[in-house]
Image: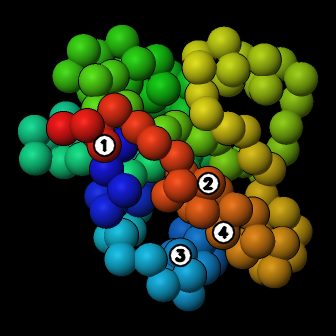
């Protein structure tokens, strides 16, 4: 995890992308925000040697590769797993099975998208503030 690296948002809903992007910009962090509509394109981006993301906010239900499959591919790829990128699910609905499946893949958080803009902004602010404060292996490079 690189605190100044890009924030990766993997979300196939354009309205959700716009709202999340607006909120991230309003929070005034210097991180670039990179959006992907599916896990395939996100995976290709993450595999670049010069890409060192701050964190990943991923939807679960997406075309091509869903969030669980993408998390597994990242976690089992030696080059990607060593980057220690916090992977958080950000989805519209939570089921017991989805939460259990997510944590069995060692995700660092599971969040439902709140109904109001203000609640969504507060949730994203808490997530960003937490990870900006957290110490990761990259702090010792």
Q: Which residue is drawn at 66% across and 12% down?
A: 104
Label 3: element kind: helix
Left or right: 115 with respect to 109? right
Q: In this figure, which residue is indicated by the disc labeled 3?
A: 24
Q: In this figure, which residue is indicated by the disc labeled 4?
A: 125
Where is residue 22 drawn, in percent x and y? 55, 83
Q: Residue at x 49, y 58 (%)?
A: 132
Q: Is residue 4 above or below residue 30?
A: above
Label 1: element kind: helix
Where is residue 4 drawn, in percent x and y? 31, 62
Task: Return the disc, 1 or 4, that comes first in the chain's sequence.
Answer: 4
Q: Is residue 107 visible?
A: yes
Q: Tell me the quadrant of the picture where the C terminus can be found.
A: top left
Q: Quadrant for residue 129, please give it.
A: bottom right
Mark-to-mark CA distance, 4 and 3: 8 Å
- What numbered label is drawn on residue 38? none
Q: In this figure, which residue is indicated by the disc labeled 2?
A: 130
Q: Are marks 1 and 4 in contact (CB under 8 Å)?
A: no
Mark-to-mark CA distance, 3 and 2: 14 Å
Q: In this figure, which residue is indicated by the disc labeled 1?
A: 139
Q: Are marks 3 and 2 in contact (CB under 8 Å)?
A: no
Q: Residue at x 45, y 42 (%)?
A: 135
Label 2: element kind: helix
Tag in front: 4 or 3: 4
Q: Do the residues labelled 1 and 2 touch (CB within 8 Å)?
A: no
């Amino acid at each position: 995890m690189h605190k100044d690296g890009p924030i990766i948002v993997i979300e196939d809903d354009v309205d959700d992308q716009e709202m999340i992007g607006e909120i991230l910009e309003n929070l005034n962090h210097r991180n670039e925000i990179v959006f992907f509509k599916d896990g395939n394109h996100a995976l290709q981006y993450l595999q670049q040697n010069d890409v060192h993301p701050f964190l990943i906010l991923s939807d679960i239900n997406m075309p091509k590769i869903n969030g669980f499959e993408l998390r597994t591919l990242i976690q089992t790829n030696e080059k990607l797993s060593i980057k220690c990128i916090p992977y958080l699910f950000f989805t519209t609905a939570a089921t017991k099975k989805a939460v259990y499946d997510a944590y069995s893949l060692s995700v660092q958080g599971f969040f439902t998208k709140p109904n109001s803009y203000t609640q969504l902004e507060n949730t994203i602010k808490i997530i960003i503030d937490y990870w900006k404060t957290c110490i990761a292996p990259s702090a010792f490079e």
